Image (cartoon, helix red, strand yellow):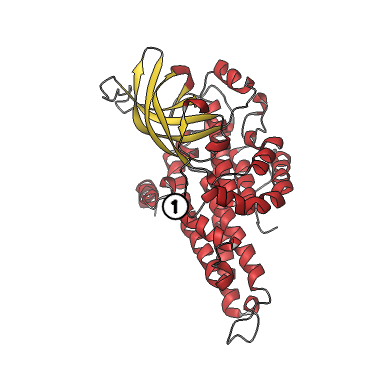
Amino acid sequence: MTETLTQETTAGSGRVDDYIQRVRSITPLVREEAAAIERDRTITKPVADALLELDLHRLLVPEALGGGGLLPSEALRVYEEMTKADASTGWAWMASSWATAGVLGLLQPSVVDELLSKDEGFIMAGQLLPRYPGVQVDGGYVIDGDYSFASGSDHATWIGAGFLVADENGNLILGENGQPQARIALLPRDQVEIKNNWDVWGLAGTGSHDYRINKTFVPAEYTTPTFGGTPFRSETLYKLTNEFTGGLPHAPIALGIATRALELVAELTAGKFRPNYTVPVGDAEIFRIDFARREASLQAARLYCYDIAQSAEATVNAGGSVTAEDIARVQQMLAWIHEVTADIVAFAHRWGGSRSIGRTSTLGRYVRDMHVATQHLLVDPKMLVDAAAVLLPVYTNAEA
């Protein structure tokens, strides 16, 4: 085991251990398929079939709806484990399974029952943050636009599209609070044109294609609020709010990449000699002190991530609400963790030497994956600026 988690054991620990074992049972398969996943730019059929067979897409879906009912903090651990098998698989599966569970709490129960009763199953993908106006018409909305980054869309059955409520002239219709109304529309995959154009050099196997929706009517009951709104369900995930949970699952992807990078560089440097070294690289003090520092940074980042998630869960389950400080700390954590893990992976790449630069190098693939992961909107350094605006007063107003 290369991770160290010191949080108190939760009542659902047996459930999360079960899901971690499911992931570990297919880790050899995922690693065997990793090169093909990167080459084909999507999760391969053997891995996609294994995810379905082990019912991994529903790990966060409430137990009452036939899912695993994991807490968000528990699901993060499972995502981290899958990412150590392959980062593209971890990312694509994280994106679709988190979205799948997330929308179910905000849909009317009758719609949920219909979606979950379909033979093809309900698996979500898509760009959920608002991008275009959606024209409000009788009974629903007309969605029209080009969307991006539909991670996992090759194996999804439904596609989401974020929009802002507008009139027929494209003018935004403001809500009762005077702000634009952001919503997510759900469409069957066959109503969406997937462009199959994901072609990048990191996280290459996520299938994060662009897609087009052509003036398609979506009934109002098949849309949910992007932020706010009153959930129809009371599970912890829905109490936490989308504002808190929206970017949260990106953290374990970064943690999993960094952990795997340290595993790989430890293996690569064991017994490896370099000119002018009197001992193998893995035994050299100059390597070991840097390794110890990076490993400590990884443990600190991991503990901060899980502490934030578990603390918020405890608050809402005790009857409290997510606060502005909670949301600020998630933003801070996401941006900071990606800085920390990027440094760890850069360390592994540097000490991996010639064994990390080959086109088919496993460590090289994780280096590329890390660089692309840092480009996501929700982990941008601007999040630190926004977080500081909330966190600074906590200190300036503290009693002497």
Does 70 appear above or below 2? above
Point out the residue furthest to the top here.
138
- Counting every numbered tag in the picture gives 1
Pick whichever, 212 or 381, lies toward us: 212
Tell me if 24 is positioned left or right of 347 in this view.
right
Which image quarter holds the C terminus? bottom left
Residue 385 placement (x, y as % from top left): 35, 51
Q: Residue at x 62, y 21 (%)?
A: 118
Pick whichever, 300 or 337, lies toward us: 337
Q: Residue at x 44, y 52 (%)?
A: 335
Does 122 appear above or below 379? above
- Mark 1 crowdedness (10 Å alpha carbons): few <14, some 14-19, many ≥20: many
Amino acid under disc 1: Ala
Q: Residue at x 55, y 48 (%)?
A: 205
Q: Which residue is mark 1?
A: 335
Residue 284 placement (x, y as % from top left): 62, 80
Answer whether residue 44 is visible to the viewer in this image: yes
Residue 384 placement (x, y as % from top left): 39, 51
Pick whichever, 373 or 203, lies toward us: 203
Does 54 appear above or below 366? above
Helix, strand or loop status at disc 1:
helix
Q: Residue at x 45, y 53 (%)?
A: 374
Which image quarter holds the N terminus? bottom right
Tell me if 331 is positioned left or right of 251 in this view.
left
Does 285 appear above or below 60? below
Residue 125 placement (x, y as % from top left): 52, 35
Answer whether residue 307 is visible to the viewer in this image: no
